[in-house]
Image (cartoon, rainbow, N blue to C red):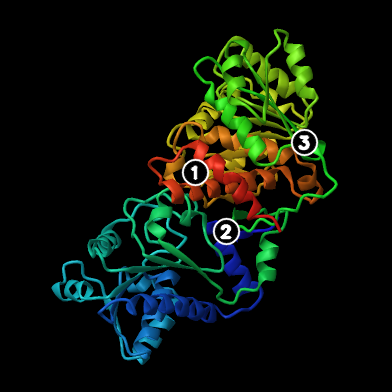
Amino acid sequence: MKGVVPVLTGEQSRELDRIAIQEEGIPSLGLMERAAEGVAHAVEELLAKGASSQVGALCGPGNNGGDGIAAAAILLERGYRVRAFLVGKREKMTPDARAMEQRLNQAGGRLEDFERDSRDQRAWLEGCGCLVDALFGVGLSRPLAGDALAAVALLQSRAGCPVVACDLPSGIHADTGKVLGAAVTAQVTVTFTTAKPGHYLEEGAEHTGELTVVDIGIPMSLLNRLCAPEAPFLSRVIGPLGLPRRPRNSHKGTYGRVFLLAGSRGFTGAPVLAAQGAVRSGAGLVFLGVPEEIYPIVAVKCNSPMPFPLPEEDEAVLNRAMGCDVAVVGPGLGRGERSDRLVRLLLERLTCPVVLDADGINALAGHIDSLDHRTGVTVLTPHDGEFARLTGCSLPLENRLKQARDFARTHRCVLVLKGHRTITAAPDGRAWINTTGNPGMSKGGSGDVLAGILGSLLAQKPLAGAGWTAAELAAAGVYLHGQAGDQAARMVGEYGMTPDDLLARLPGTIEGQVE
């Protein structure tokens, strides 16, 4: 799959460093110096935009602090006015951090002990044109306290003064993006080798600011070893996706027949939006089965999709679905004895890919065996609330990324956990963190469009023929959906945009991703 870059968890990042240093013999000080160069460069770029060339670096005793100390030394050597402060105990300083303190001394500076009540230190920090946050990196797992909490509060109190964070804003959990008590809000975060999930998920996305990934000299061969199939890695879709061009001699059947089971009284828009999403993203034929009572309303709204009233017999519905390449089940379906029964029947009897959305997912509660017994591909698209009802877990989700991956592996399905930074998890352990989309998409109907897009991509034979897996197609669909939403927001604004605006931009979005 094109257009992806690896994203490593905190544990994976530490293991990569260990392999590089202990097994491959790469000098740790060299890695730290290159990391510090990246931080210093980011500081210089921000200082060029301001009036003050004064820098304050708040550094912890670990190797993240060592990065900050080394950056302070580099900036001193280049003529900037810099003071570095140690937030923590000197006896806990790592050997590399101590080595960087010596470099700082040689550059004419010194590592001062942080004093939360010092007027002199506060006055210096208040006069800075840029601050460096080098308190904690990927290893933080508990809420901040003591001097570290006071240092973060001081960094946060300097409104308008840009902060460059080393590796990860202090107080952000590397894997979940959650705030551990308090966290630094950085204007720029300089991370090393790869990004981390916490840069994109939960509050971490807001605290990270502009993210820069710096190559510090760890060979890609080591990264590939860590990301081997037996140790699946995390990726985020970034585009371009490199979708194949359509063959000149193709026809409707080439691009698949999509069956939709959707809609109910009071929910006549959802089936239409899902069907339009399938058509607009390239499906050859889209058949839309809706309850007979809403069929006249839906039929008026459909030109390209082909709506039909659901037969009274469940077997007849199943037969219609069996004649298609993909089934999309659930948008606006509602809950009832027959609809729940139909969902489970389709899951148990269909061998083609099935996309379960909304009430299609809710119908699985207490009947997860219908999912587990499937032999075909299944894609579930819950938001956090639907996921909690399905699994019995509590809200808010503790670790969206881990929970999505665990569910996909346990139930051998593709899970699209919708929300800010939608996560697509594959049964082999891979996951993609999506970075497209905006708050204007937080409207009823946006998810219905996504369900249609996913069904369409899974149905198109040229995509499967080009080597795309079901999970990769789902991740690509999420990316395209969000990108079309971003284009709609630029055109009409986040407040007033609608799912129809998103649909209107979808064809151009997809065309822009074709090689």
Residue where numbered disc 3 is placed: 256
| Amino acid at dot 3 | Gly
**Residue 310 percent coordinates (x, y):** 68, 14
- Say which residue appears at 61% left-offset and 15% top-offset: 295
Task: Name, please, the residue furthest toward the top.
Answer: 312
Which is in the foreground here, disc 3 or disc 1? Answer: 3
| Residue found at the very far right of the displayed protein | 249
Q: Is residue 58 left or right of residue 451?
A: left
Quarter placement of the C terminus? bottom right
Residue 8 got which mark? 2
Q: Is residue 69 something that shows in the picture?
A: no
The vertical placement of 5 against 129, above or below, is above
Which of the pair 297/58 is nearer the observer? 297
Name the amino acid type tagged 1.
Asn
> Mark 2 and mark 1: span between their CA atoms?
15 Å
Quadrant of image for the N terminus: bottom right
* Nearer-the-camera pick, 58 or 344: 344
Q: Is residue 23 visible?
A: yes
Question: Element under label 1?
Answer: loop
**Disc 1 marks which residue?**
399
Camera-side residue of 335 and 384: 335
Marks 3,1: beta carbons within 8 A: no
